[in-house]
Image (spheres, coloured by chain):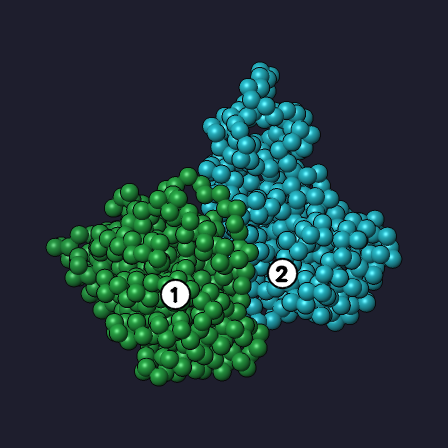
Chain colours: A green, B cyan
Amino acid sequence: MSNLLIKNARILDGDAADILIRNGAIAKIAPGIAAPDVATEDAGGSIAIPGLVDAHTHLDKSLLGWPWYKNDVGGASLTAMIENERNMKTRLGLDPHVQSMRHALKSVAFGATLIRSHVDIDTEGRLRALEGVLETAERLADVVEIETVAFPQSGLMIREGTVELMDQALAMGADLVGGLDPCGVDRDPKGHLDAIFGLAEKHGKGIDIHLHERGELGMFSMEMILDRAEALGMKGLVTISHAFCLGMPDHLRVEAMLARLAALDVRIMTTAPTSSPAPMVKQLDAHGIKIGAGNDGIQDTWGPYGNGDMLERAKFVGLRNNLRMDVEVKRALDICTGGGAEAMAKPRRALEVGAPGDLVLVDGETVVQAVVTHAPRRLVVKGGHVTARDGRTLVGAP
Amino acid sequence: MSNLLIKNARILDGDAADILIRNGAIAKIAPGIAAPDVATEDAGGSIAIPGLVDAHTHLDKSLLGWPWYKNDVGGASLTAMIENERNMKTRLGLDPHVQSMRHALKSVAFGATLIRSHVDIDTEGRLRALEGVLETAERLADVVEIETVAFPQSGLMIREGTVELMDQALAMGADLVGGLDPCGVDRDPKGHLDAIFGLAEKHGKGIDIHLHERGELGMFSMEMILDRAEALGMKGLVTISHAFCLGMPDHLRVEAMLARLAALDVRIMTTAPTSSPAPMVKQLDAHGIKIGAGNDGIQDTWGPYGNGDMLERAKFVGLRNNLRMDVEVKRALDICTGGGAEAMAKPRRALEVGAPGDLVLVDGETVVQAVVTHAPRRLVVKGGHVTARDGRTLVGAP
């Protein structure tokens, strides 16, 4: 937990001021702060925004640092993509610690200060991916906060032994219980959901489940998730990632589901996907549902896209939701900063006294201009500790 | 029409070779070409791709170079956005020549060698926007080929005098007749379409009509467009931009329309939009329909997004269409290069002997990596003439 004084930053679109961070938290924001005992950075009039938050990614999957991976599988079948990934991981002998270091530091260079990573748990890789990501989380503790979700990517009920591995993963330190398409992948929604909610109860941890199922199938799975959240009193402890089904056209059906999600304080994580239905920000906002955003996997066997930049992701959130007004684009940024942290049940990243000392200095004319151009990052600060400068992290990647 | 020898470029993902351009066209591609009479550029092993093609933009609309425009209007109503733009243009006193120079050169810096620009024709701005863009097209003739579409942005039938202005615009040199949502904006599909097809017939020019109308309304307007194209023997001379309705879920309905579009060789221009239905590349490809892509307006009163980069647009085409395999991402790039030129009825931009000497050198490991990262442009060449180097155009913007 460091101290730092940043001179002459524009606070979002406000006036220039200095920001004093003491013991890792924002202590004062005002013009002309004097703190001779504290290290000082000159923002040079650049814009300060809160630390970026990637609330949904997969640090163990990226192929960063490897020769270009030629994708011949495509997006035709989810099962084919899952099989291909598991095979490629073994064939390439990927080291989850090395890959997660590369990915996390790439995100940090773009301004990430908080990341939630799903981590594959399966009967082939067993707990190796989690061990690697936990090692990365420990090594980078001063650089970026990494939260882990034990994620049964290859299925839970269809691969015997996975529930036990999930149990071990949670005992080892995974922060949340993951899940995946209880109908679409596991073909056993009751079995899948009973298992993950059982693990959550046993370990006293929250849930973050991938739900790609669309339309009525997704709504059915969502109802089963909410039934269990309600029965177990898990208000505020359940997150649904992707939630494509909330983008279905049946407005009344979606509205009723949103009301129920809001009542149970379920959080929604989205990548603002371009080729599938998606939860709509304004519609969720009207219900007060907490929303986070994430880059998902980047440059992995699933596809070549993605770079770890949550400011670019804010642009995608804006584009996907047809957010054109400045005030709307700022909401997209909030989802990728303070709002995302709140959706993760973490302290809100904000340029306010008392908030964590996490911020990013970006070159730009206005905040919205910085978002839509994903402008260069001049400085990244986590807990008062400088983590990246001019797009380069201070800690080197392996 | 210049001569140029480019040494040591990787031809798409192929082997390193030299490219000789003579009289503006590619004369030879081979290793170790000697041409002592010709200026030489060393590609240094970077990747050569064909010149980028923006087949749908609005050079007269961008606010580039102006202080940040705060958007308070948003995307709620098309009419409100149209009114707002017309008012802002007058209030700011935008000079269409200056703005189109800025926009076109920004695109050139990213590798554009061919641009189709719609240009507003209305009873307030009258022909001023077209005059400005035509001046830009003339000034930049050696830098980028600019084609213009006389575009009745504020409506054709609802604003008396617009048809006459469109007539003058075409006489002045606009290359194509534009149109806009004959139902949604003009509330008179027969009147609108009879007028623009009448102008096309009178001037012997093609049509490129904006069609944002969704679902069955768009299909209805599209049928009326095709009826006229068929009756007037305009095979290959009609383009429909946006064509959101082709993204409707009714597969049989869309397939039947695609068959008719293919039979009339109608071309489709798309921005691969993220917040609306869109024509699907693979579905159109199955019918052999020519597809171009465009950035649409960039940083204007309509919204803050866009930067003129057609390599980034290729990424959007890939994302929107769920193109994950390398071969699929290359098709997305083709739509933004050679395929886009073909959709504009221009010679195909390709790295082949006989093709126009338009190419871009990009840093990158592979073509797909260059697309998904929209990698830095080292050199842009049009007709053998170097137009930009390291992201800067040789001609300065006003």
Q: Position of residue A118 (x, y in %)?
A: 35, 60
Residue B223 lies, with reference to residue A70, above or below; the image says below
In the picture provided, is B21 more to the left or to the right than B64?
right
> Few, some or many C-alpha atoms within 10 Å of disc 1 (few <14, some 14-19, many ≥20)?
many
> Is residue A9 or residue B222 the one in the foreground?
B222
Please, which residue is most extreme toward the front here?
A160
Crowd tier of the residue under label 2, counting other residues whose Cα lies within 10 Å: few below 14, some 14–19, many 20 or above: many
Amino acid type indicated by mark 1: Leu
The quadrant where residue B257 appears = bottom right
On residue A2, the disc is: none
Q: The residue tagged with tag 2: helix, strand or loop?
A: loop
The image shows a total of numbered marks equal to: 2
Residue denoted by label 2:
B278
Residue A156 marker: 1
Secondary structure beneath dot 1 equals: loop
Quarter placement of the C terminus of chain A: top left
Q: Is residue B4 left or right of residue A336?
A: right
Chain ID at mark 1: A
Marks 2 and 1: which is nearer the front?
1
**Of A288 and A83, the residue lying toward us:** A83
Q: Residue at x 76, y 57 (%)?
A: B259
Q: In percent of the image, x 38 and y 58: which residue is there? A: A57
Is the residue A244 above or below the residue A396 in the image?
below
Give residue B80's position: percent from left, percent from top: 61, 70
> Which residue is drawn at the image coordinates 81% and 51% (left, top)?
B235
Q: Is residue A390 above or below residue B224?
A: above
| Viewer-nearest residue: B89 or A366 | A366
Residue at mark 2: chain = B
Picture coordinates of residue A135 (x, y %)?
24, 53
Residues at circles 2 and 1 in contact by the CB criterion of under 8 Å: no
Q: Give amino acid for label 2.
A: Ala
